[in-house]
Every structure is written in C-alpha cells, then in structure tokens.
Image: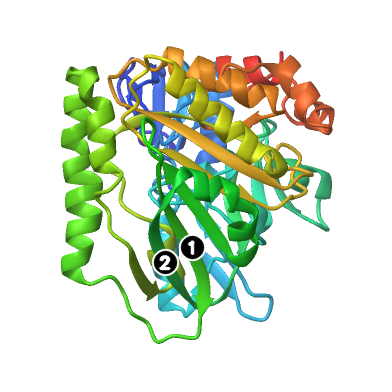
Amino acid sequence: MSTAQRGTTKSGEAWRNWAGNVVSRPVREVTPASVEELTAAVRAAAADGLKVKAVGTGHSFTATAATDGVLIRPQLLTGIRGIDRDKCTVTVEAGTPLKRLNMALAREGLSLTNMGDIMEQTVSGATSTGTHGTGRDSASISAQLKGLELLTAEGELLTCSETENPEIFAAARIGLGALGIVTALTFAVEPVFLLCAREEPMSFDRVTRDFEELYAENEHFEFYWFPHTGNCNTKRNNRSAGPAAPVSKISGFVEDELLSNGLFQVVNSIGRAVPATVPAIAKISSRALSARTYTDIPYKVFTSARRVRFVEMEYAVPRAALVETLRELKSMVDRSDLRISFPVEVRTAPADDITLSTASGRDSAYIAVHVYKGTPYQRYFTEAERIFTAHEGRPHWGKMHTRDAEYFAAAYPRFGEFTALRDRLDPDRLFGNAYLRRVLGD
C-alpha cells in the first residue's frame, strides 16, 4: 500500500454523521498517520480530479464534511505536540478529541478557559465550525486559538497566528474546511481552576425579565426552556476558591444518566410515537431535575454526556435582541399545534474578531432548537428560522439552516474577505462540496 493509500477503505462505503441526517459516499477514505501522509493523500486526490474533505466525529448537523471524493480521517493525527508554560499555550494535533485534550491538560494542571457542552468532537472539527459554550467574558473555543497549521490545496504547510499570516489566521480559526486542512492548533490555556455550578429551576417569565441581571452577575449563564410550559432550568458557573465538591456518584447517576439520558430517551420515544402526549410529558420533564450546587475543574462542569440523538438548529442573535426573540419563539409554539419534546437551549458569547464567527463584531446570544431523531422537524425549524432571521440571526455553521451566500454576505461585514481568501488559497475548490457552494458561493 502506497503512502497516499494508507487507511483507504473500499469504494462506495457510506459515511454518516452523528445524527444520521447526512449521508455521503466517498470514493475512498484515507487515515494518514502523519502530515506527510496527509499531504500525499491531498496531492493524490488532486491528481485524480477528486475533492477532499476532512471529517472529525461527525457531530455537525450540516453537510460541512460530506464528499463524494476523498474523505480524510484524522484519528491518527492526535496528541499534544508541546506545552509552553511561559506563553501559557498548548499545541495539539488536529485529530485530537476535546475529551482527551481536556484530560491531558488537567494532568498538567492546566485548563481551557471555556468549553462547549460536549467534548466528543475533534479539536479541528470543533473550531472549524465555531463550537461555543456560554460566557459573559470568555468566548468560543475558536477564539481561544493562538495559532494553527494549515495544509493548502497546493500542498503547502502554513503556520498562522496574529503575527504570521495574520489574514489567514483571522479566517481559518473558523474556516469551515474551505481554506485547507488544519493539521495542528495552538490554544491559550491557564492554570486549572475550580468552577462552582448552581443549577436551579426558574420560570420563563423570571428568566426573561431578569436576563440582563443574570447575565451580568455570572461568568457563565445558560438556561433551557421547555416548550408547552412556563418552566426553565438555569445554570450559573462562576470561579471558586474551593474546596472542590464534585457531583456525587449517586447524584450523577440519577440526574445525569438516569434522568437526562435514560428517562429522557424514553419520554422522547413516547412523544415521537404519540405526539399528543408531549405537552403533559414536557410539564413532568421540566420539573424532573432538582436544584443542585457542585464545584469541580472546568471541563467537568462545562460538559455532560449527550446520548439521546437529535437534530438541531441554532442561531446567534444580537444579545440585546435575545428576550424579544425568545418570547416570539414561545408565542409561535404556543399558538401552533407543534409538539416539541426537546428543551430550547440559550447561551451567550462576547464579541470576537474572527471573520466568520457567529459572534464576530457583536455580543451575541444563542438560541438552539432541537427535535428528537426521527421526528418531523421541518415546520418547527422553518418557523423558528423565520423568527431568528428577522432579528439579524447568524446560523451556527455546524447546525441545520437554509441560509445561502447572499444572506451571509449581508450578515457578515467581512464575508468578502473570507471568500477572497478562499479564491486565493483554493481557486479550484479542491476542498469544496455542495454545502460550501451554498453558504460561500461558487
């Protein structure tokens, strides 16, 4: 087997994303064990007239990584290249799962400043699509990048940072796989710290009335609203001097495994089979989780296991428009005959300077709507998207939406910078696919 063919599977084997809503059939898959093997695979694909896409764990709900050409699997490109304690950075291979990175950093007494709510994704997949958590002052995972390494369509390996190829760095931190294949990432880190998490039920009316106060008083504030009810579950995370007081094994099993995964799977299955039961189930589900407080290292507070499969749409709106947008969404659901069994998730992020970040240039709030896998979602998502776009919403790049390049050209002041850079780095669209044609243009 040649270097370029290492890891190749038989022709026509289907690839599916985590949610199962995206399927593609690449001509071949390649699992390179080094940057040199990756470069050879990209050059071989170009010589064969095939497109190339890299895929992580497939947690995007859009077809960002789908291809009928060559699919690159980065699971052998993993591990920490180096830690610079003076600069407080860590450089990691692109295929490293966030879970492994967080655990390795904790062993070194280090931590990322902020995280999303799951950590199954690869670092390159998470950053390339703009994965984020919630934060008053701390932004997305991509905004924590200090440098990256990018393999271009010409087979050139570029090192990018604020001082080296800065125009590429500004865009490639959330590059959608359109500019090249990310091979390594350098993250800002800090000494590990403790977060105190306070989870508490709260009414929809109180959350929306007091949102600005709750946002201002907490480093990380998020909440879930349960459609067909006036109930929310809130979570406030703030730094703590300690001592650590992790969730007990019994509480963790009951709250996080039995209720949030096991029972939630059952009630969603019932709701899918008998939609009329959803409002009653929602009232029970919204009261199932009790208030609790615990203190632990960051990734154990930010993240949780998500085993119930779903499809999702999420939009970022200006933070000042959140309450009005959310009230419109609730009013739409209340007026309709829709039956929504999944809670609506609300988070925030400060403005950043990444070209195609959903928080680029503005403080943002995120509203995510979900539907249990196998349940019709089109009408709900269409109505939600109508509301989000009326408030200058920007869809998450890895979550379902119907927007196109014309919309994004108006939504992102620097959209033209990104597409011009793409023309320069990949004029022949070696890294293109149907999704990128829709959202970026030809």
Judge by depth and name the residue closer to the eye, 98 or 373. 373
Q: Secondary structure at mark 2?
A: strand
Q: On the image, which quarter does residue 22 sit in?
A: top left
User: Mark 1 or mark 2, which is nearer the start of the sequence?
Assistant: 2
Task: Using the image, tell me which numbered label, if any, was put on residue 236.
Answer: 1
Q: On the image, which quarter does residue 180 sit in?
A: top right
Image quadrant containing the C terminus: top right
x%, y% of residue 368? 49, 35
Q: Looking at the picture, which amino acid does disc 1 mark?
A: Arg
> How many neighbours does mark 2 have within 10 angstroms: few (below 14), some (14-19), or many (20 or more)?
some
Q: Looking at the picture, which amino acid does disc 2 mark?
A: Arg
> Pointer 2 and pointer 1: residues touching (CB < 8 Å)?
yes
Q: Is residue 159 above or below residue 197?
A: above
Query: Viewed as shown, does residue 213 lie left or right of 239?
Result: right
x%, y% of residue 337? 37, 14
Q: Residue at x 28, y 28 (%)?
A: 279
x%, y% of residue 31? 40, 38
One can see residue 396 in this view? no
